[in-house]
């Protein structure tokens, strides 16, 4: 428990609101995108700027008080139960440099705001399927872009960042700079275990035409659709993005009325290309079964967030993700048994996202992303409120058993809740994890940053 006198000391050196539980802004500044993850720190600071972050980190280091970080709240992998939470959502600076082809954002900026500025210039960035996600938290976890097969991971595009390290120093990190190169690598895939990112510069990608959308099939076509998807994806060019989601949607207000209580199979598709190119590539899947919805075609890139139909409002959920080396017959049959036609699974969505393409390429500079060699990413999510919560957890456990023999690692942003049980594997492969631990020991020997998908100090 943080003493009142210590809080008063911090309050004197920061400009943003500092609240304890029950304070006027505590609930707002601790709330995440997943309402079922309830943060209960001893205090939360709504940082008004970089100086607030520095002063707060120095204050915490002097007292050995652990520190958590939150901007949009999408990355809350475990609830805090002590310490100081620094909310960086107020850091909203956004600057596009069209000549350099870059965007520089504050820690609280969401991808939707970036696209509003860049699309009009014929530029885009390595964003995910939802525009509500924060840029820095997303890229610091590697970031699996919607157009990942064309662009690679979001971390591949990070050119520079400012970070407040656990000693309270503000460090400017740049690609190719030998100084703090290990820290720059760790913060591109290692999440927020090493300091507070206050700004980030990413490279943008020019584009002219874009084709995207989805095809919805009835539930009973799931077996046929998955077979067609498996035959179709190996034929796709390496810059085409595709995923297949088995949906089992509850009858709840946050869903479109026509989809409530239904269990369709949703193909998602996107390519930087023309109508002719898109139609030609998608044609084999349009002849599968009897689709009841087809939204794929040339589209305004500003509406790219509509492809996956991710919710814009917070939903209490429990999720889990893993990388798959491949998708053989046995695994396909197992997946259908768990989430396919007639399974009555409580999982709202189970998505197979095609990897490969630029996602399989080595990064331009060393980073902390594992799993570039994987064939697919499997991600599942269900409601995490009674009475559905227990059924969701059990269904995720059953799915783990089915996919276990085919697992090829995990992407930390999509892994789900942090796993702390004995024997739990880290979200990184052994070589990357060893580098992250060495960086942790060098920059955070007090282990101030130990929440979420935390990298522990090496055992001496």
Image (cartoon, grey):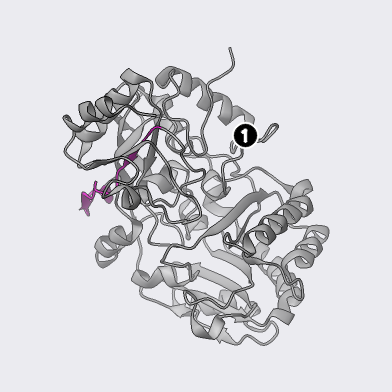
Query: Residue 304 vs residue 223: left or right?
Result: left
Q: Is residue 304 visible?
A: yes
From the viewer's perspective, is residue 5 above or below residue 362?
A: above
Question: Is residue 102 located in the magenta-colored stretch of the structure?
Answer: yes
In the rendered image of this protein, does residue 328 appear above or below residue 300?
above
Residue lying at 73% horizontally and 51% vertically, measured from the top left: 400
How many residues crowd around disc 1 within 10 Å: few (fewer than 14), some, or many (20 or more)?
A: some
Q: Residue at x 35, y 75 (%)?
A: 300
Nearer the observer, 274 or 403: 403
Out of 424 and 147, give the one closest to the viewer.
424
- In the rendered image, residue 29 lying in the magenta stretch gets the answer no
The image shows residue 155, relative to residue 311, as above or below, that is above
- Above or below, 272 against 22 in this view is below
Can residue 170 be seen at all in this image of the molecule?
no
Which quarter of the figure is the N terminus placed in? top left
Q: Which residue is mark 1?
A: 429
The percent coordinates of residue 397 (x first, y second) are: 72, 52
Q: Nearer the viewer, residue 19 or 94?
A: 19
Residue span colored magenta:
83-105
Regarding mark 1 in the picture, which secondary structure is present there? loop
Q: Indicate the position of residue 58 as horizontal and vertical percent values.
A: 28, 23
Describe residue 17's horizontal placement relative to residue 293 as left or right: left
Residue 294 percent location from the top left of the image:
54, 83
- Which quadrant of the view contains residue 338? bottom right
Q: Would residue 282 be found to the left or right of residue 338 on screen?
A: left
Image coordinates for residue 140, horizontal then vertical, percent: 42, 41
């Amino acid at each position: 428990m943080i003493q009142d006198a210590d809080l008063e000391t911090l309050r004197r050196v920061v400009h943003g609101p500092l609240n304890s539980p029950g304070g006027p802004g505590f609930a707002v500044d601790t709330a995440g995108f997943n309402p079922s993850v309830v943060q209960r720190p001893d205090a939360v600071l709504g940082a008004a700027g970089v100086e607030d972050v520095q002063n707060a980190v120095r204050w915490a280091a002097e007292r050995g008080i652990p520190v958590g970080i939150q901007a949009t709240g999408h990355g809350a992998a475990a609830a805090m139960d002590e310490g100081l939470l620094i909310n960086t959502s107020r850091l909203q600076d956004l600057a596009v440099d069209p000549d350099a082809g870059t965007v520089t954002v504050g820690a609280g900026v969401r991808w939707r705001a970036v696209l509003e500025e860049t699309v009009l210039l014929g530029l885009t960035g390595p964003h995910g399927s939802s525009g509500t996600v924060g840029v820095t938290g997303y890229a610091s976890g590697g970031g699996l872009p919607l157009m990942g097969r064309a662009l690679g991971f979001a971390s591949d595009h990070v050119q520079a960042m400012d970070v407040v390290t656990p000693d309270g120093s503000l460090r400017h990190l740049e690609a190719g700079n030998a100084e703090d190169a290990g820290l720059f690598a760790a913060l591109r895939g290692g999440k927020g275990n090493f300091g507070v990112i206050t700004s980030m510069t990413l490279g943008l990608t020019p584009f002219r035409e874009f084709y995207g959308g989805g095809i919805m099939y009835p539930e009973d076509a799931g077996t046929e659709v998955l077979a067609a998807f498996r035959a179709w994806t190996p034929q796709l060019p390496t810059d085409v993005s595709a995923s297949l989601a088995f949906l089992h949607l509850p009858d709840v207000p946050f869903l479109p009325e026509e989809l409530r209580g239904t269990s369709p199979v949703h193909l998602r598709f996107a390519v930087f290309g023309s109508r002719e190119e898109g139609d030609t590539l998608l044609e084999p899947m349009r002849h599968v079964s009897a689709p009841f919805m087809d939204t794929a075609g040339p589209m305004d890139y500003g509406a790219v967030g509509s492809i996956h139909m991710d919710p814009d409002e917070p939903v209490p959920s429990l999720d889990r993700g893993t990388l798959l080396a491949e998708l053989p017959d046995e695994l396909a049959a197992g997946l259908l048994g768990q989430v396919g036609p007639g399974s009555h699974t409580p999982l709202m969505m189970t998505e197979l996202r095609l990897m490969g393409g630029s996602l399989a390429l080595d990064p331009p500079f060393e980073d902390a992303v594992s799993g570039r060699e994987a064939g697919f990413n499997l991600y599942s999510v269900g409601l995490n409120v009674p009475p559905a919560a227990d059924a969701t957890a059990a269904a995720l456990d059953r799915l783990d058993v089915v996919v276990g023999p085919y697992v090829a690692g995990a992407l930390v942003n999509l892994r789900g809740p942090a796993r702390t049980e004995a024997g739990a594997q880290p979200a990184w492969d052994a070589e990357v994890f060893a580098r992250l631990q060495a960086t942790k020991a060098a920059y955070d020997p007090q282990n101030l940053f130990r929440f979420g998908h935390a990298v522990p100090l090496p055992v001496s």
